[in-house]
Image (spheres, rainbow, N blue to C red):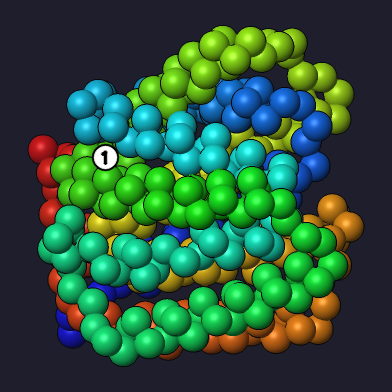
Amino acid sequence: MKQAHSPSGVAAAAGGVFLWGCGAVIIKLTTSPITMVIFYRLVFGIPMLFALWWFGRDRTLPWRAASVGGVLFAAHQLANFTALRYSTVAVVTIFFSLQPIVVGAVSKRVTGEHTTPQFYLWALVAIAGCATLVIAANGQHHGTPLGNTLAVVNLFIWCAYFLATKRARATVGTLPWLFVMTVVAGACVGVVAVVTRQPFTPPHGRELGLLLALAAGPGTLGHFLVTWAQPRIHAAASSAIIVGVPIVAAVGAALFAHEPFTPVEVLGAAIALGATVVAMRYLPPPVTEEVAENTVRSQRS
């Protein structure tokens, strides 16, 4: 039977989403200037991705396709990390989770993938659950107008990056894409750091540990899992799974960043997760398992 997502694609995307939620908490715990947090997160990730790329089967370097992704990813990182400094983890990540509606609306034009009215309905329910979480969180910690504005800007930049990745992954391997994209993104952030005269003092102690964890976990493994899943799952489905980011982030922030996670927030999280699972049942083909097989064959040839 044709499906809009394969089990392996869903599992990989869910694993990446969990790591991204953890990453939001790690960012909240850092104290370095935000541009330097982004810069070192990317720089520390490059050797890891280079090693994986070097020992992998696909040794191509898709500079044209991945450079576009790198510029978009650098912009996303700057908007997202800065928003996390000026707002709560829950507020920033709820805006991030609104992408199923944006991605679903434009995925037909960009990737040729269709959505259904039922998907939109359940995506809205999931977003309502996340909104419940955010409203409850705002009762404890209020975000600033700058933080909230950057969170909205980040939503649209991320959707552009997400769809660019989805489109490129039809012909480009996971590791070549991630390696080139990270190099380009690191160069872009480095230029911003130089222009804004940020201090390039290497981090040490606890801060170094946090940045290494951010680069290895959410930065490298998390993005590898989600990028690998792209040909194996409908764009809107993988986007819907990302609704889990604010849930993981809110729980982590409550445990490690002293941002309370109240019973009302728990209710909102449960609604969001349940509605996301139902929404994925209403996605039509393409047959992503066939797409995945074609991708693998093209990489081997």
Residue drawn 61% across the image and 75% down it: 131
Residue 244, picture quadrant: bottom right
In this figure, which residue is indicated by the disc labeled 1? Answer: 173
Question: Is 206 situated left or right of 121 in this image?
Answer: right
Q: Is residue 108 above or below residue 163?
A: below
Residue 221 in the image: state x and y as whole percent.
53, 44
Question: How many numbered discs?
Answer: 1
Residue 33 spot, x, y in % from top left: 72, 26
Residue 44 visible, this orientation: no
Q: Of the residues shown, which amino acid type is indicated by label 1? A: Gly
Compared to residue 147, the image places residue 58 above or below, namely above
State which quarter of the image contains the C terminus. top left
Please report the residue visible at 61 percent of the width from the left and 54 percent of the height from the top.
148
Expressed as whole percent of the image width and height from the top left, the position of residue 253 reads: 78, 58
Given residues 116 and 280, the one toward you in this image is: 116
Residue 229 locus on image (x, y percent): 36, 57
Quadrant of the rendered image containing residue 103 = bottom left
Asked whether the viewer can see residue 144, the reply is yes
In the rendered image, which quarter contains the N terminus?
bottom left
At horizontal 27% and vertical 87% (from top left) the residue drawn is 117
Question: How packed is label 1: few (under 14 Cα within 10 Å), some, or many (20 or more)?
Answer: many
Decide if residue 80 is on the left or right side of residue 142: left
The residue located at (42%, 86%) in the rendering is 122
> Which of the two residues, 12 or 267, is positioned nearer the viewer here?
267
Local secondary structure at mark 1:
loop
Which quadrant of the view contains residue 5? bottom left
